Image (spheres, grey):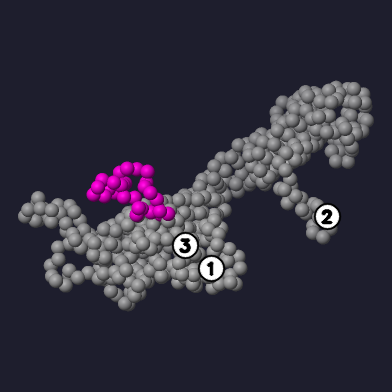
């Protein structure tokens, strides 16, 4: 008797299923790998971009610092010259009015999930998150380092021997210990104010303040 | 492998690299042509369920075994004008087309990708596609062999899958190359920071003390101030007398993993600290791929009148101008680049 039913046999179905599973498996693993690499790449890219932006922003601000007030691995406080007009002063046309010092605070705060975030504060304002995109679990919280003058050499200062007058150099170091792509970005910023150049702008209030430490060449 | 393999096979990759370019091209053309010849044979025999390995090449019409002169890809076809040399039966242009296509593909792949695994992979994949295409068209032409049926054959499905794969893979590669670009970018950013750092350092050096790296480390005014002064430093001894070699090898980026030999590194540190006046610390891990040198040269002027300093008499005073050039080399898996930044300083 001739078989007139049109249908798949079990063997045909099994062969098709096997082939489908094999092809699907290959395509799926390929897709998985590609997407994993893509996400890893975009994460690394974001981390690098954010780190570099933070580095640029902070180092630019420190460049115009007059004096370092406090420097610890997780926090940095310095005074900076602002040249915006101060409405509280009586004579708005005077040049001197435009120069005033502000205190800037930077600190690294650990959040509940263990990630670190930068915060910035100007004078009496409350701390505000700085560059809100930046928040990292991989950051090693040893970011700010000062270099001090000892004898004729600059050496990394130890916080115990605290001498804020003599920190001519600040190093900002972002050490990201990512599993896949560890990287370290750092920048050293030289502070010219320490060598008696910027105090021209500053109005000395007492005789003690006029004597700035000089570098012996 | 190993001890039973003849030396010439083990050494083949090395010898092949040393061959002159025309020989390499000829060899690649010959091998790809032979692959094409094999495919032609397989396309004929597979539908007929003949062995593709054990039977020697023979004419399909008279069955005469083919000699060496009939088996040279492309050329044999041209000499025999598409006919069997024994029974003068004509065989189709499929033979020469597939052989020629594969020869061209092999040469193009070699010129673009060199002898890499990627090139081999693309070549094999294309051969597979050609083989399947050949099977399909050959079967279509010769309808006595495979009856015309509705629906897809396994071969057609396979062909479709291979084509789909060939389309998907480049898309995947797009993302992979994206990742490689990210890593490259990271290296550029760090290299740029290194350039800037050195320029910042050089700003602090008094004008009279500005020195090129060669004059500072290899050939200072006092001989004992140099880094490579000892007699037993071997290879590094050459750096002392040859500035070109010095700039090819020296780097002031030293890491814990990769640094000068201990004796030299101690001296380097001493010279560095005396000159730049800050303590030398190792660079962080991962900075092994960078190399950095400084060149300082006296220049007459910058080629731009607005930079000229005028004396009271109105004449240009160009005696005290130097050009500082900092160069960073990146040598990593993904990157071989030289980055340079220069600035001018006056007394």
In reply to whether residue B323 is colored magenta, the answer given is yes
For label 1, the residue is B228
The mark nearer the N terminus, 1 or 3, is 3
Q: Nearer the viewer, mark 2 or mark 3?
A: 3
> Element under label 2?
loop
> Element under label 1?
loop
For label 3, the residue is B215
In this picture, residue A85 sits left or right of residue B49: left
Is residue A88 visible to the viewer in this orientation of the structure? yes
The mark nearer the N terminus, 2 or 3, is 2
For label 2, the residue is B6
From the top left corner, tell me how far across and down residue B101 is, in percent: 72, 31
In reply to whether residue B15 is colored magenta, the answer given is no
- Packing grade of label 3 (10 A; few <14, some 14-19, many >=20) is some
Q: Nearer the viewer, mark 1 or mark 2?
A: 1
User: Which quarter of the picture shows residue B162?
Assistant: top right
The magenta stretch spans which residues? B297-324
Q: Closest to the observer: B237 or A175?
A: B237
Residue under mark 3: which chain is it in?
B
Residue under mark 2: which chain is it in?
B
Same chain under badges 2 and 3? The reply is: yes
Say which quadrant the C terminus of chain A sits in. bottom left
């Amino acid at each position: 008797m001739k078989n007139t039913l049109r249908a798949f046999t079990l063997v045909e179905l099994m062969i098709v299923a096997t082939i489908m599973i094999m092809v699907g498996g290959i395509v799926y693993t390929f897709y998985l790998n590609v997407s994993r690499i893509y996400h890893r790449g975009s994460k690394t890219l974001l981390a690098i971009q954010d780190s570099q932006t933070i580095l640029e922003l902070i180092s630019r601000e420190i460049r115009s610092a007059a004096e370092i007030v406090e420097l610890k691995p997780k926090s940095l406080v310095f005074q900076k010259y602002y040249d915006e007009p101060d409405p509280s002063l009586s004579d708005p046309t005077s040049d001197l009015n435009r120069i005033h010092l502000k205190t800037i605070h930077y600190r690294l705060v650990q959040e509940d999930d263990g990630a670190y975030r930068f915060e910035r504060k100007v004078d009496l304002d409350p701390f505000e998150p700085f560059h809100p995109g930046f928040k990292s679990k991989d950051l090693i919280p040893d970011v700010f380092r000062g270099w001090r003058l000892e004898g004729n050499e600059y050496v990394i200062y130890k916080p115990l021997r605290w001498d804020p007058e003599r920190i001519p150099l600040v190093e900002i170091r972002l050490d990201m210990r990512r599993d896949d792509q560890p990287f370290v970005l750092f920048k050293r910023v030289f502070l010219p104010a320490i060598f008696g150049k910027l105090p021209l702008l500053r109005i000395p209030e007492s005789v003690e303040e006029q004597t700035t430490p000089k570098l012996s060449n | 492998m190993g001890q039973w393999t003849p030396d010439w096979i083990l050494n083949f990759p090395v010898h092949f690299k040393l061959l002159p370019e025309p020989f390499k091209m000829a060899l690649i053309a010959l091998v790809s042509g032979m692959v094409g010849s094999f495919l032609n044979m397989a396309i004929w025999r597979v539908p007929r369920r003949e062995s593709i390995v054990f039977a020697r090449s023979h004419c399909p019409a008279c069955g005469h075994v083919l000699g060496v002169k009939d088996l040279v890809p492309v050329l044999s076809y041209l000499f025999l004008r598409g006919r069997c040399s024994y029974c003068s039966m004509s065989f189709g242009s499929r033979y020469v087309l597939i052989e020629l296509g594969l020869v061209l593909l092999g040469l193009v792949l070699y010129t673009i990708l060199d002898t890499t695994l990627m090139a081999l992979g693309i070549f094999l994949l294309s051969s597979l596609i050609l083989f399947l295409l050949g099977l399909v068209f050959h079967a279509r032409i010769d309808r006595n062999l495979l009856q015309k049926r509705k629906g897809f054959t396994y071969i057609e499905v396979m062909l479709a899958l291979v084509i789909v794969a060939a389309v998907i893979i480049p898309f995947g590669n797009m993302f992979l190359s994206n990742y490689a670009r990210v890593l490259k970018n990271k290296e550029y950013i760090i290299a740029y920071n290194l350039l800037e750092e050195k320029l910042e350092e050089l700003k602090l050096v008094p004008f009279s003390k500005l020195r090129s790296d060669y004059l500072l480390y290899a050939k200072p005014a006092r001989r004992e101030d140099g880094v490579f002064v000892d007699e037993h430093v071997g290879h590094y001894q050459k750096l002392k007398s040859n500035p070109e070699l010095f700039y090819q090898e020296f780097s002031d980026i030293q890491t814990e993993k990769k640094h000068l030999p201990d004796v030299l590194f101690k001296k380097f540190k001493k010279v560095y600290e005396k000159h730049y006046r800050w303590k030398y610390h190792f660079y962080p891990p991962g900075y092994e791929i960078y190399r950095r040198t400084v060149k300082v040269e006296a220049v007459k002027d910058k080629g731009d009148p607005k930079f000229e300093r005028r004396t009271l008499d109105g004449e240009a005073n160009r005696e005290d101008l130097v050009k500082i050039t900092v160069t960073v080399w990146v040598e990593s898996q993904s990157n071989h680049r030289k980055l340079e930044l220069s600035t001018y300083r006056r007394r």
